[in-house]
Image (spheres, rainbow, N blue to C red):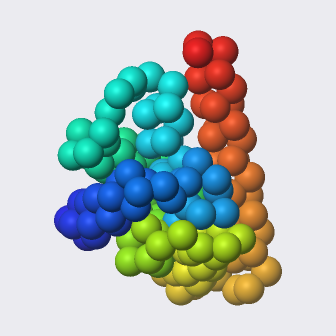
Amino acid sequence: MTFLLIFGWITAILSGILSLYGVDYSNPSNAGGSAQLLAPWVLSNYIENASGALWVATFAILVMVGYLVLTAISVPVLALVTWVTEGRGRSFYQFLSGSAKAILYGMTPGFLFGWVPNPLYLVGLWATLWQALAVKEIFELGWVKMIFVVVCWVIIVGLIHDAGSYLLYIIS
């Protein structure tokens, strides 16, 4: 968690500053991860007349909320998929712990370079690759099982993300 909080804040603040100067993080190809998509949406739809330090602070806080929410969703989903695939008598807690490590390891590219506008969502793809490799190593999976687990995890989290986006659309 310390890693997430320290490096997450650095990326959140730097992306908030760049956003203030015109970098469009609502465009997924610029964002270093899904967490950055929340901030411009909230700022453009719910907070009027934010500028300067208020814009940067609000953007950074919303990015951190995005990181925490995505982590809170991703860890149990990844743990569940891996546990169902590889459980064999091991406790679900072991899978939660390993999943948290894999998720945070995979967030490293986003934390270090997610604030840099990048073509084709490269940092997000890089992060997913790191998470997949972490899943393989932490849970000692073969390549096929690792791909299966990661694809299932991405699909489930994507469906949860889309359902949440739809609910926010209905509310607004």
Q: Is residue 47 above or below residue 116?
A: above
Q: Nearer the viewer, residue 43 or 125?
A: 43
Q: Nearer the viewer, residue 166 or 148?
A: 166
Name of the residue lying farthest toward the top: 171
Instruction: Where is residue 21? Give x, y as percent.
Output: 41, 57
Q: Nearer the viewer, residue 159 or 121?
A: 121
- Pick the quarter of the image with the N terminus: bottom left
What residue is at 27 percent from the left and 66 percent from the top? 10
**Residue 33 at least partly seen:** no
Indicate the position of residue 78 as horizontal and vertical percent values: 57, 58
Q: Is residue 30 visible?
A: yes
> What residue is drawn where x is 44% and y is 22%?
46
In the picture, which quadrant includes the C terminus?
top right
Q: Position of residue 22 (x, y in %)?
A: 48, 55
Left/right placement of residue 159 relative to residue 110 reads right
Q: How many marks?
A: 0
Q: Nearer the viewer, residue 116 or 63?
A: 116
Q: Residue 20 in the image: x percent, y percent?
A: 38, 51
The structure residue drawn at horizontal position 26% and vertical position 45%, both measured from the top left corner, is: 52
Q: Is residue 23 above or below residue 57?
A: below
The answer to whether 75 appears left or right of 4 in the picture is right
**Is 22 on the left-hand or right-hand side of 142?**
left
Q: Is residue 60 above or below residue 88?
A: above
